[in-house]
Image (cartoon, rainbow, N blue to C red):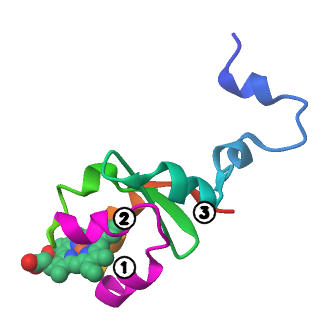
Amino acid sequence: MSSLLDTFQGLPVHPLVVHFAVVLLPLATISTMHKDSTSCWSAIDGNVYDLTSWITQHPGGAGVIKGMCGKDGTAAYNSQHRGQGRPASELARFKIGSLK
Ligand code: HEM
């Protein structure tokens, strides 16, 4: 019986490496196409996050998240939440790639 792993036979990389492939997103894409609450992406510490659904869930209010849409939000995020566990674990759920 064939399995998903058979798909990778003969390829020069292990299947687990494929799982960890990184999507690289330029800041220009973020700032032109994902800059408001209809599609809100932000870069934080070199990673890119789709924060659209988080805008209305943020305990600190929608405004500060809206202010990060289409921008590098590293300074805003770290000034408020650096070293805090719950914000970091929430943030991780929204990662969609890395900044190119
Ligand atoms: C994607 C970015 C962010 C995420 C994932 C996030 C996440 C969170 C979480 C999980 C909490 C609740 C913390 C707790 O109760 O333990 C929180 C609270 C808060 N956040 Fe954020 N945050 C983000 C960005 C920001 C920014 C940029 C600011 C301000 C510049 C901010 C201001 C606050 C404030 C003031 C609270 C406290 C709200 C209260 O207790 O009344 N957050 N945030």
Tell me the mark number nearer the camera, choosing from 3 and 2. 3
* Residue 19 found in image quarter: top right
Q: Which residue is mark 2?
A: 91
Q: Quadrant of ligand 1?
A: bottom left
Q: Is mark 1 within 8 Å of ligand 1?
A: yes
Choose between 79 and 16: the one closer to the eye.
79
Q: For the residue carrying disc 2, how many other residues have a C-alpha within 10 Å: few (<14), some (14-19), or many (20+)? A: some
Q: Horizontally, is 67 left or right of 44 in the view?
A: left
Q: Is mark 2 within 8 Å of ligand 1?
A: yes
Asked whether the beta carbons under mark 2 and mark 1 sit within 8 Å of each other, the answer is yes
Q: Earlier in the sequence, mark 3 or mark 2?
A: 3
As displayed, is residue 91 above or below residue 97? below
Q: Please, what secondary structure does the residue beneath circle 3 have?
A: helix
Residue at 71% x, 43% y: name it.
18
Q: Which residue is mark 1?
A: 77
Name which residue type carries label 2.
Answer: Leu
Q: Quadrant of the C terminus?
A: bottom right
Q: Please, what secondary structure does the residue beneath circle 2 have?
A: helix
Q: Position of residue 75 (x, y in %)?
A: 43, 85
Q: Earlier in the sequence, mark 1 or mark 3?
A: 3
Q: Please, what secondary structure does the residue beneath circle 1 have?
A: helix
